[in-house]
Amino acid sequence: MGEEVKEVKILEKPWVEKYRPERLDDIVGQDHIVKRLKHYARTGSMPHLLFAGPPGTGKTTSALALARELFGENWRHNFLELNASDERGINVIREKVKEFARTKPIGSAGFKIIFLDEADALTQDAQQALRRTMEMFSNNVRFILSCNYSSKIIEPIQSRCAIFRFRPLRDEDVAMRLRHIAEREGLELTEEGLHALLYVAEGDMRRAINVLQAAAALDTKITDENVFTVASRARPEDVRQMMLLALEGNFLKARDKLREILLKQGLSGEDVIIQMHKEVFNLPIAEPRKVALADKIGEYNFRLVEGANEMIQLEALLAQFTIMGK
Amino acid sequence: MLPWVEKYRPRHMKDIINQKSAVQKVNDWIRGWLGGTPKKKALLLAGPPGSGKTSTVYALANDYGFEVIELNASDERTLEKIKRYIGAAYTLDVFGRRRKLIFLDEADNMESSGAREIAKLIDRAQNPIIMAANYYWKVPREIRNKAVIVEYKRLTRRDIQTALYRILKIEGIFVPKEIIAEIAKKASGDLRAAINDLQTVVSGGVEDAAEVLAYRDVEKSVFQVLGTIFATDNVKKARMASWNLDMMPNELLLWIDENIPYVYPKPEDIAAAYEALSRADIYLARAQRTGNYGLWKYATDMMSAGVAVAGVKKKGFLRFYPPKTIKLLTESKEERSLRDSILRKIMKEMHMAKLEAIETMRIFRSIFEGNPEVAAHIAVFLDLGDKELEFLAGDKEKAAKIKGRMLGIHRKLKERGELEEHVRVAAGKKPAEKAEPEEEISEEEIEKAEQELEAVEEKKDEGQIDRSKKKGKQATLFDFLKK
């Protein structure tokens, strides 16, 4: 709502919500996808969809906008949002789907939409069950599955979906949106501030807007300093510190750090290993070592997926770091 | 709190449970002391732990007015002490003149040189000497020959249950009979252990009794298993160590994990041990995924033998630790549940995946710490509770500032009737004016669909085309009904 309204609302939504595009046309940087989604909206029919791509590139926004354009004012009634990592297992998801599919769509639409975020968080078995559920209710429900990597979705599901690959946003697209928000909010967006925002965002619109709002909460002048202050909170150095401890040969301390990240902060093993991979090339070690460690990370990423206990696999990886550091 | 094993120790010989013939023999022997000196001055009580030997000594002393001098036969200083007491038949204390009774526990656990000395002392004794042992044949012959041997039998499960119920009745506590039965079973004839278990269970709440009881057993034996794995370089020995352990392999894995860095000082040995653990974990996962639990043996091979031969172990005394992760999880429980509930609200209200919500929460934290005005809006939007507010703001003072502003927002929203609107939207309810009766798809329809699906399962792809056609028809029917 709110974009056209100048007055300050009594309740200000967080900016990522306030400035989330409502219409497909307002989505930036994914023209080829938007074009097809608009076609679905016009014809009032669509297959199951699979949205794959990095965070903050418009997957959820596209699903919400598509629902609005398909269903009009009834969209909330015909749209169910689920999160695979949050619902307790495939059975809970199935029950919710069943419950939602029980009632017929409101308005002229011939179907309802279920948006399943983090579909790649489901195990292979759960995905098989999901596939059966998708078929069981395909009479009046379309699924939009969202994930970071389509390769983690099983073949039978992929083959039943139209697959859309969302690209990381270009800096120009993010910058345009940030300037627009800054103007609306009466901020002074300095050139350095904007560059800092683009640097920390890495093509992730949500991160860019979140950091912008937090920096604006410090001062209406958006400086690179404030941006980096906020961003360092967003992406703490824990994983890097853990790797450095291991490289110094301090396995026990590194292990404690890992356990803190996993248990207290709630990151999954996979989150940690992805961050390790991003960070390994910035470590203060000889170049060939970085490659060797990246190889180890890859091996243990594989074992993490194969294994039962994430913590054991990551601890084993840290132990590998302790010998590579010497 | 007084340990129940002391509180409920029998006061009189007649209270000793189910050892009638032993009690009879003991009574006969002590009467010999009342009139003078019996033929055999020592008594040897032999029987399994917790069968009533120690209780007999104290009940006897109470019934006949003796003072008990309790000594441990395996203690080197015992001999000196016995010498001190043995000379005089009577000593004076605040209770007046009382006769001493020397009680020598663990008589099957003494050095043979000590045994000869004690045998001499028995000859000179002017007081009754009672010894206790689990096995009388392990008591040195010199002593055994000078003692009347009284055997205590192992108590039955029923004996133990009866004793436990008697305690519960006096304490006025109810414990389900299955738990009593479990305690009695585990005790295998040891009443002392059973009473200790009962008190442990009662003091911690009956709900997790099963775990408490299991844990008592397990903890003892898992340390033994660790002791073997981390002491041997012999693959066979290491493998066998885990065989008799009543613990799931995935749990044993955590115990081994915890202790590797304390046992292996060198990084390359730690890495080698973890390499084995990593492999073990993969076998565990495969077993779980495929239901082929035969794969467990490879997992236990790797975690026992694999870890045992990983390198050069620390020498000397090794202390083992229980898995810290379990403790960590309990300690941070409240913090984690607050964090999770905030994350869930962010995920729901702001349409995010978990990792995105974690990042967003961190960014919000800097807003909540620095700008109560903006924070208040976000807090109302997410419908945060007081504890959640405090979690994000970092302290009570900042949380209070935000709370004040939240109340302002709530008031203004109410004035404009927007609060209900927001709450309604947030709860995902549909607008009131749209509350037309919903058309239900009947249970039968769903079942039919399920059956169809099963039938189609074999010839998947043609099936899908069929159904999509049917969907088209249904959709038009709905449209018609709506108009």
Image: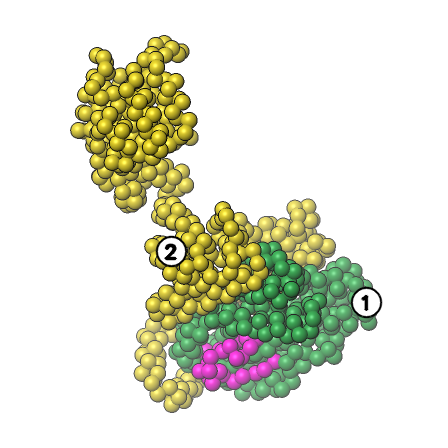
Residue A159 on the magenta segment: yes
Residue A152 on the magenta segment: yes
Choose top left, top right, bottom left or bottom right for residue B378.
bottom right
Which one of the lettered chains is coloured green?
A
Q: Nearer the viewer, mark 1 or mark 2?
A: 2
Query: Going by the image, does B413 lie left or right of B460?
Result: right
Residue drawn at (34%, 68%) of the image? B294
* Quadrant where the N terminus of chain B is found in the figure: top left
Query: Going by the image, does A134 lie left or right of B19?
Result: right
Residue position marked by numbered label 2 in the rendering: B241
Host chain of mark 1: A
Which one of the lettered chains is coloured yellow?
B
Residue drawn at (29%, 15%) of the image? B126
Host chain of mark 2: B
Alpha-carbon distance for marks 1 and 2? 69 Å
Residue position marked by numbered label 1 in the rendering: A188
Nearer to me, A56 or A313:
A313
Q: Give the extent of the magenta segment.
A: A141-166
Nearer to me, B229 or A128:
B229
